[in-house]
Structures are given as C-alpha cells and as structure tokens.
Image (cartoon, rainbow, N blue to C red):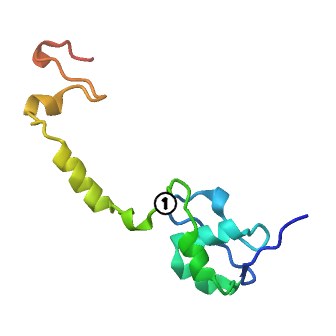
Amino acid sequence: MKKLCQFLLLAGALLQDIVNWDNDLLCSNANITDDLALYHLKTNPNCRELFQELPENVDELIEDFVLPGEKKSEDESQKVEITGEEKFKEDAKDSTEDVTKEDATTDVGARKLPENVDELPKKK
C-alpha cells in the first residue's frame, strides 16, 4: 500500500532541481514523496510558497533532512561548512609549485608546435 505524503503542491506546480538540473528530481503532485519535497525545500527555500499543505514540523524535517552526498555527523557542533570561495582559496594555498612559462605551454591535451615551424612544408 502506498504511504501517504505529508506534502501537497498547488495545482499545476512543478518543482525543478535548481542545484544539478537533474530531471529525475522533477516534482509534481503526481510523483511527490516526503523525501522529494524535503529535498526541494532544503535546496530552494523559496519554493515553500508553491505548497498547499505542509506538516506542522516542516522546519524540523528540513533541518534533519540529509541531502544526497552529505554526511550527517554525530556531533553537529563539529560540522563546518566550506563554501566554494573558501574551498578555492584552500586549493590555491595547497598548490605550492611554481608554474613556469614552459610548464604552461606543456602538453595539456593540445599539441605543442615544433620549434622549426617555418621549415614545415606548406599546404597547397
């Protein structure tokens, strides 16, 4: 027997995944589940206005919901969230190698031109 969902969208509402643009996470009243509704509410809090019915403890449910790829730690006080900009700065600090001009032109998927370019035969 299908478990009843605690959430109900407004008629005609369609929620789209704004994080990964994953079509498997499209949500309407035809396929809504508690997990799918909580995913959308956690990733896009503005979509709350598209819901006709929400459970009374929706804020607690959203806070406790673990997104795919997230790990729920035992001690929430130790949880440190790193934003994209902070991660970029950390990665920049970690790269301690000096990049020379020669390194920058080394093969990275593109071919390096031979030094005797002028001596190569011309196409007719």
Estimate the x, y position of residue 82 in percent, counting from the top left: 33, 61
Which image quadrant for residue 79? Answer: bottom left
Side of 118 relative to 108 (left or right): left
Estimate the x, y position of residue 86 in percent, counting from the top left: 26, 60
Q: Which residue is mark 1?
A: 74
Q: What's the residue at 72%, 84% (across, down)?
A: 10
Is 46 or 124 nearer to us in this picture? 46
Q: How many marks?
A: 1
Is 96 or 25 nearer to us in this picture? 96
Q: What's the residue at 35%, 63% (across, down)?
A: 80
Estimate the x, y position of residue 77 in percent, counting from the top left: 39, 68
Where 50 falls versus 29 (above or below)?
A: below
Q: What's the residue at 47%, 59% (across, down)?
A: 73
Q: Amino acid at mark 1?
A: Glu
What secondary structure is marked by label 1? loop
Residue positioned most to the front = 75
Side of 43 relative to 110 (left or right): right
Q: Quadrant of the C terminus?
A: top left
Which image quadrant for residue 101? Answer: top left
Q: Residues within 10 Å of mark 1 (few under 14, many from 20)?
A: few
Q: Quadrant of the N terminus?
A: bottom right
Q: What's the residue at 77%, 74% (across, down)?
A: 5
Where 24 falls versus 37 (above or below)?
A: above
Estimate the x, y position of residue 67 in percent, counting from the top left: 55, 61
Is 96 or 57 nearer to us in this picture? 57
